[in-house]
């Protein structure tokens, strides 16, 4: 995975060094949708074979697709990225969403045309801001609009081999590491159940994924819970270094402030868990908790972790949620 330093909206991006990346997630007032009943236990995801097949045939190949950017910082030419690169970006988003049992998204050409102009600005200036300053190089109205509506990422390198394709940026958004990103804003936008259309634009070193405004009001899968890692079999390379999250049903209000989280391994040993403070404005209400000591499988056997979250308040009543994550090696 990419090493990233993740930041929230309107903050100054900090580099993690050569071949690293900076990312930033936009904040927005959440749209409302029809809500459903809260579930006390989670359904498992796809079969082990299906999860691994998707990883090997969809996710992994997508990470290797080059951007094929034809533009240039000189002259502020946004150019284009290859159709294959955009397809790989959408495929990566939809593989992650399939693990969470969410509806797939489609590419929006109009917002993609603006997103690539934002990516050009970030590459030209070597830093990220959702509110793009007027004094930056290559600034346009389209770039400014994309900056406000997008997850954004920038690779910190002078070597094109360390570039940041859209597909690799999605991996960074899902991983969401760094002290400045404990609310996992990027992940929450990518896994927003209401999201149905996205725009994406990539240059050699930057990506903008337009996520605000592509939500639907109906006609989408809206599970009671969305976790990352997801319940059931989950590819171990996508395990986000212990930064786990649990989101409630889209369009419903959840109070996680008094929630208690326990994570145990197959042998019943309890892992150390640190609960993070919740933050609004990034898709669904979400609980983030850091799990220390997560081990990834080295062979065919899955590493099994049981998660129990109690004390969640929904509409004035307490609910609990329990699920099992089975990390498997592709």
Image (spheres, helix red, strand yellow):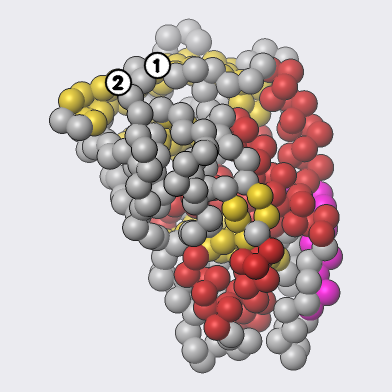
**Quick check: can you spot residue 177?**
no
Residue at 63% x, 86% y is: 138
- Residue that badge 1 annotates: 41
Q: Secondary structure at mark 1?
A: loop
| Image-based side of 154 in relation to 257, left or right | right
**Extreme residue in the top direction:** 267
> Is 259 colored magenta in this rendering?
no
- Boundaries of the magenta span: 63-71
Residue drawn at the location 79% of the way across and 32% of the way down: 56
Q: Is residue 268 visible?
A: yes
Please determine whether, in this image, residue 18 is positioned above or below residue 279. below
- Residue at horizontal 48%, vertical 8%? 267
Question: Alpha-carbon neighbours of circle 1 within 10 Å: few (<14), some, or many (≥20)?
Answer: some
Foreground residue among 110 and 142: 110
Magenta-highlighted stretch: main secondary structure? loop
Q: Position of residue 189 (x, y in %)?
A: 49, 50
């Amino acid at each position: 995975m990419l090493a990233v330093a993740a930041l929230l909206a309107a903050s100054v991006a900090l580099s993690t060094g050569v071949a690293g990346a900076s990312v930033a997630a936009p904040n927005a007032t959440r749209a409302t949708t029809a809500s459903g009943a809260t579930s006390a236990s989670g359904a498992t995801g796809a079969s082990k074979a299906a999860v691994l097949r998707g990883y090997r045939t969809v996710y992994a190949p997508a990470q290797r697709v080059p951007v094929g950017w034809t533009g240039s910082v000189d002259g502020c030419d946004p150019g284009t990225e290859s159709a294959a690169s955009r397809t790989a970006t959408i495929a990566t988003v939809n593989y992650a969403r399939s693990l969470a049992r969410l509806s797939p998204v489609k590419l929006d050409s109009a917002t993609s045309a603006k997103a690539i102009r934002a990516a050009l600005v970030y590459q030209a200036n070597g830093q990220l801001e959702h509110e793009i300053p007027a004094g930056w190089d290559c600034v346009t109205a389209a770039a400014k609009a994309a900056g406000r509506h997008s997850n954004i990422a920038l690779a910190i390198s002078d070597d094109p081999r360390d570039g940041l394709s859209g597909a690799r940026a999605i991996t960074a958004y899902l991983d969401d590491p760094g002290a400045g990103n404990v609310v996992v804003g990027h992940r929450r936008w990518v896994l927003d159940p209401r999201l149905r259309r996205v725009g994406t634009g990539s240059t050699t070193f930057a990506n903008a994924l337009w996520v605000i405004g592509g939500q639907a009001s109906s006609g989408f899968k809206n599970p009671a819970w969305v976790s990352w890692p997801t319940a059931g079999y989950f590819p171990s390379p996508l395990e986000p270094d212990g930064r786990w999250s649990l989101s409630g049903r889209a369009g419903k209000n959840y109070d996680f402030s008094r929630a208690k989280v326990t994570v145990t391994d197959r042998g019943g040993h309890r892992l150390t868990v640190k609960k993070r403070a919740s933050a609004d404005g990034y898709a669904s209400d979400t609980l983030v908790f850091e799990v220390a000591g997560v081990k990834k499988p080295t062979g065919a056997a899955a590493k099994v972790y049981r998660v129990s979250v109690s004390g969640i308040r929904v509409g004035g009543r307490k609910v609990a949620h329990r699920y099992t994550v089975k990390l498997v090696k592709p």
